[in-house]
Image (cartoon, grey):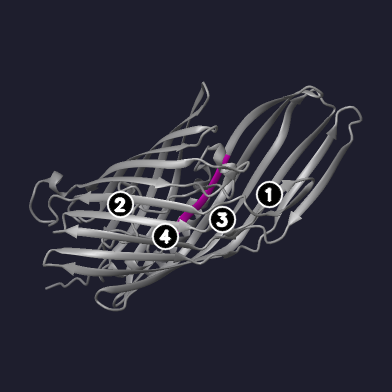
Amino acid sequence: MKLSIIGCLLMAATATGAWAQGGTKSPYSQYGIGILSDQSQSASRGMNGVGLALRNGSNVNTLNPASYSSVDSLTMLFDMGLTGQMTNFKEGSVRRNVSLASFEYVVGSFRAWKNVGVTFGVLPYSNVGYDYQTVSRSTQTGTLTESYSGSGGLHQLFLGAGWRVLPPLSIGFNASYLWGSIDRTVSPVSSVASNTLTKKYTTTVNSYKLDVGLQWEQPIGRQDRLTIGAVMGIGHNLKNNAEMTIVSQNSVSSINDTTLFRVADALSLPMSVGIGAAYTHKGKLTVAADLTLDKWGSKDFPVYQNGDYKLLGGQLEDRTKVNIGLDYLPHPDLQGGKYLEHVHYRFGVGYATPYYNINGQNGPKELSVSAGIGLPIVNVWNNRSVLNISGQWIRNAADGFITENTFRINIGITFNERWFMKWKVN
């Protein structure tokens, strides 16, 4: 059993590292450390990623590690997710459509000791991916066309535990190895000038990430319950270097000159806090809401300015995110009822502010709406596993900038297996 768990963890690390690079094609991913990923799992994707107060032993919920203590002693959970999306970019009268697909995450969860659940896996943290050109005009140098491209992102290999300290109170933590690289390039495509500059930005991260959480579950009457959840991410410096290389090329003399800049301790993770609440009625209806705040505004970021590459403040700003979602299950009991009565029906909405500025102006705000279903997988061995399918519409917009409309399909499978059941033969 231990070898199986270790093997699944290693496969998750290999698969996600290989496939998660294509998570975005947004030009907004050139700012900060890229587009921050939705770190929820398949069950809560239909609820627009809400989850700080969700507590269900049949699903993995990495948004709050205190939820790990809800898994029962017989269960082994595995959850893996795929995402496909199509994005429409609009700037003035110009429109472009881009589609992509990516393998996002693999997580697993089981009970290690009485009242203690353990979860492990690989999750994305941020994604960078863009490629576009701009044309500028000058009365002295004529027309200059430049290409902007970037790739990479950050990922998390994590191990977490949740402990039910008292019947209503659970606490937990996630300890992650955070790794990845981000590459950005600005290069001339065509120019009438004899001198051109190519700028290359690179940074590599090998660090850690630590998150803690708690949940308080309070019964209300005989059939309802209210759960309050809170999480905190420990902000710290990633102790990495950021490098910038400028290559100056002269088309007349064919002389190239290279200048290297290096910024030490370039990137930091912000302190983050979140609070959520979830109300469950008769095991059928769950309504939940989350509010999170990431303190990016207190962090400096490396910028090339006035001939120098250095850390500057004011490049990032605090990010606020609000999600509201619901889950309706007509027939909670696994026995009896028609198949459609065992299907989860989900809906959610969300709003988020950006964590970066664009040339001193606020970046795009995000509006999102989601809907999904959870289809039980019924066979002769198991009726506890679920195929979760959800659709999500996301709009990023700000005055004077590109408007993005994304339609995303999330497909996840939650394998719910009774690995630890003791069989008795008469």
Residue 253, picture quadrant: top right
Bounds of the magenta segment:
121-129
On screen, 81 above or below 233?
Answer: above
Callout 2: SS = helix
Position of 223 with respect to 39 (left or right) is left
Query: Could you tell me residue 228's position as x and y percent?
Result: 30, 65
* Label drawn at residue 43: 2
Q: CA distance from mark 4 to mark 2?
A: 20 Å
Q: Is residue 128 rendered magenta in the image? A: yes
Mark 2 touches mark 1? (CB < 8 Å): no
Q: CA distance from mark 1 to mark 3?
A: 22 Å
> Which residue is label 1 attached to?
202
On screen, 340 above or below 160?
Answer: above
Callout 1: SS = strand
Callout 3: SS = helix
Of residues 60 and 35, the one nearer the viewer is: 35
